[in-house]
Image: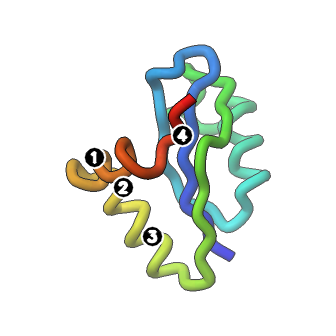
Amino acid sequence: MYYVYMLRSISQPDQTHIGFSRDLKKRLAAHNSGQSSHTSKYKPWMLATYLAFSDKAQALSLEKYLKSHSGKAFANKRLWPTD
């Protein structure tokens, strides 16, 4: 499976991250251990939402879309959990 995931910083909840991975548990652990320079300053992270795909191209396409202006608007309205 291929995963598109959405993370929210626990220490700074206004910070979010959208990514792609083949191994979701391992990737979350990598973010939380500081292995990603882009996300290390906002750790720890919690998994907010993920979507699983059997097709890699579809997953990558969704990740790219969610990082676009219109994709961010869609994600804010439909995918980010409201606490």
Amino acid type shown at disc 2: Leu
Q: Secondary structure at mark 1?
A: helix
For the image, the number of numbered tags is 4
User: In the displayed structure, does residue 81 sit left or right of residue 22?
Assistant: left
Marks 2/4: CA–CA distance = 15 Å
Q: Residues within 10 Å of mark 2 (few under 14, many from 20)?
A: many
Nearer the camera: disc 1 or disc 2:
1
In contact (CB < 8 Å): disc 1 and disc 3: no
Write the residue at 59% across / 49% down: 49
Q: Which residue is denoted by mark 1 in the rendering?
A: 73
**Quarter-of-image position of residue 40:** top right
Mark 1 → mark 3, Cα distance in angstroms: 18 Å
Task: Please name which of the two marks, 2 or 4, marks the residue nearer to the observer.
Answer: 4
Please tell me which residue is depicted at 37% across the width and 42% down the height of the picture.
76
Q: Position of residue 55 (x, y in %)?
A: 55, 84
User: Which residue is at 56% across, 22% downward?
Assistant: 42
User: Which mark identifies residue 57?
Assistant: none
Instruction: Using the rendered view, name the quadrant where residue 61 is placed.
Output: bottom left
First-in-chain label (4 vs 1): 1
Residue receiving disc 4? 81
Q: Earlier in the sequence, mark 2 or mark 3?
A: 3
Q: Is residue 63 left or right of residue 37?
A: left
**Above or below for 29 versus 55:** above
- The residue that label 3 is drawn on is 60
The earlier-in-sequence mark between 4 and 3 is: 3
Q: Which residue is mark 2?
A: 66
Say above or below: 67 vs 48: below
Front residue of this view, candidates 2 and 39: 2
